[in-house]
Amino acid sequence: MRGLLVVGLVVSLAAPAAAQPKRRYKPGDVKDAKLVETIKPLKGFVDDGVVFDGAGGRLVYINSDSGTMSTLKVLDIGQKFAEIRTIDLSSFTTTPTRVELVPGSESIYVAYRVGSGDDATIAAALVDSNGKVKRKFGPATDVRLTTYEGDLVVVTYDVARKRTKKGEVQMSHTVEVRALESGKRVGKKVTMLADDSGYVKKLDFKLQYWQDDYLTAVGIKGGQWDRKQDQRSPDSAGRYDIVQRLFAKRRLIKDVTEHALRVQIRAEHPNEASFLRVTNDLTAVQWVTEAGEIADVEIAEPFHHYDPKSLRYQLAADGGMYFSLTIDPVNPDAVGRKKADPKWLDLYRVAPGKTKAKRLARLLVGKRDVEWVASAEHWAVLQKHVGFSRGGTELDVYKLK
């Protein structure tokens, strides 16, 4: 009897362990975060351009359909995502591209697309809490809400390609800056005429890229003639202030190769003061700061596990950076194991002045593309449509641990 009891005890203890199969994850599973809200409109879909306000206490999204409806909705997260404001945008657009809550105001800035295809342009409107349009900007090639000397301004940028009477190609770059609330012009409208290489003869300046939401033109400024030396000084890196209409900064180019590399990187990310990029050899993520410093970002997962084309990032309110990378199911290590890896979407955050990123959460995604926006406490993930470029059927909001 003793022997039977011992055997029975061993079997009973071993049974629970044997009954625990390895967990199989499915799309929608999440780690280090909790699903707290799913937004699924009764009509239409959740459009692109979801945002949190600066403090992260409100979530703003647009409920659209294929062409007749466009409604902006503001949710209070602290009130269990209660809908505290609804604004009909369809009186002036059904194709919004971006919305922003204006700090210190009940007004909302809405950028939207005008036209379609290659002829499409961008316009913007400032609307009050009742949806009344207070002011419009554009349409233009691009329209940006930004700040100039501490004040909110809207910058419209137009670029046109044409031929002169002599048959030469000429690029016309026109920038206009207006105060957001009053609409008053800040400085004069500036038009720069450049040849096909970007050279602006009037300024003796070769335009290479735009920065500060078109407030600064960056490129090569021709040297000045020195009468005493009877020669021209070397060309320099120049920054042309559009509002002041002068070269605010010039810098001697000491290392031509390094300068060319930095220009190439900046030109790939126009109007971004601080951004992330994947290195040319596809081995790491780099952070390019506003000061021009370039540093590799340390992440929790070997970079070769990720799809290098999957990098997405968002500037944080404190100057840090949120970013995501998606696991490549058939990465080299998975191929070596002859077993595909789960397709995790990893959300990271890197703090200002740091290079080591913290992985905040992991979400298992399926075949659909996703767009996301993050705040200090929440992560909103939009499951994109299949076969339709705009929006998705539902928006999931996760509480970060």
Image: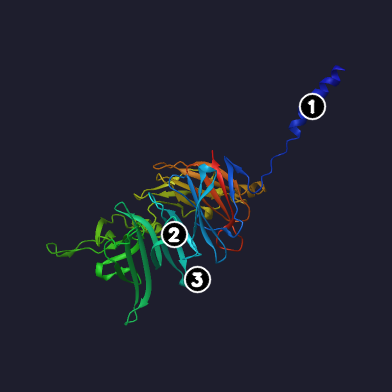
Helix, strand or loop under label 1: helix
Q: Nearer the viewer, mark 2 or mark 1?
A: 2
Q: Which residue lies furthest to the right in this view?
A: 1
Residue corresponding to mark 2: 110
Q: Are marks 2 and 1 in contact (CB under 8 Å)?
A: no
- Position of 174 relative to 368 (above/below): below
Judged left or right of residue 108, residue 149 is left
Distance of label 2 from label 1 (alpha carbons): 65 Å
Q: Where is residue 61 in the image (x, y as percent from the top left)?
A: 51, 54
Q: Given the current orientation, which residue lies at the most extreme top position?
A: 2
Upstream in sequence: badge 3 or badge 1? 1
- On the image, the x and y values in percent for residue 94 come to 51, 65
Point out the frontmost of discs 2 and 3.
2
Q: Is residue 176 visible?
A: yes
C-alpha gap between disc 3 and disc 1: 69 Å
> Would residue 300 be seen by someone viewing this image from the given angle?
no
Q: Which of 360 and 151 is in front in this view?
A: 151
- In depth, the one of 340 and 213 nearer the eye is 213
Q: Which residue is located at x 25 percent, y 56 percent? A: 249
Closer to viewer: mark 3 or mark 1: 3
**Helix, strand or loop for disc 3:** helix
Q: Which residue is tagged 1? A: 12
Secondary element at tag 2: strand
Instruction: Give the residue pinned by disc 3.
Output: 117
Which is nearer the eye, 314 or 39?
A: 39
Where residue 109 sits, quadrant-wise, is bottom left
Inter-mark Cα distance, 2 to 3: 20 Å
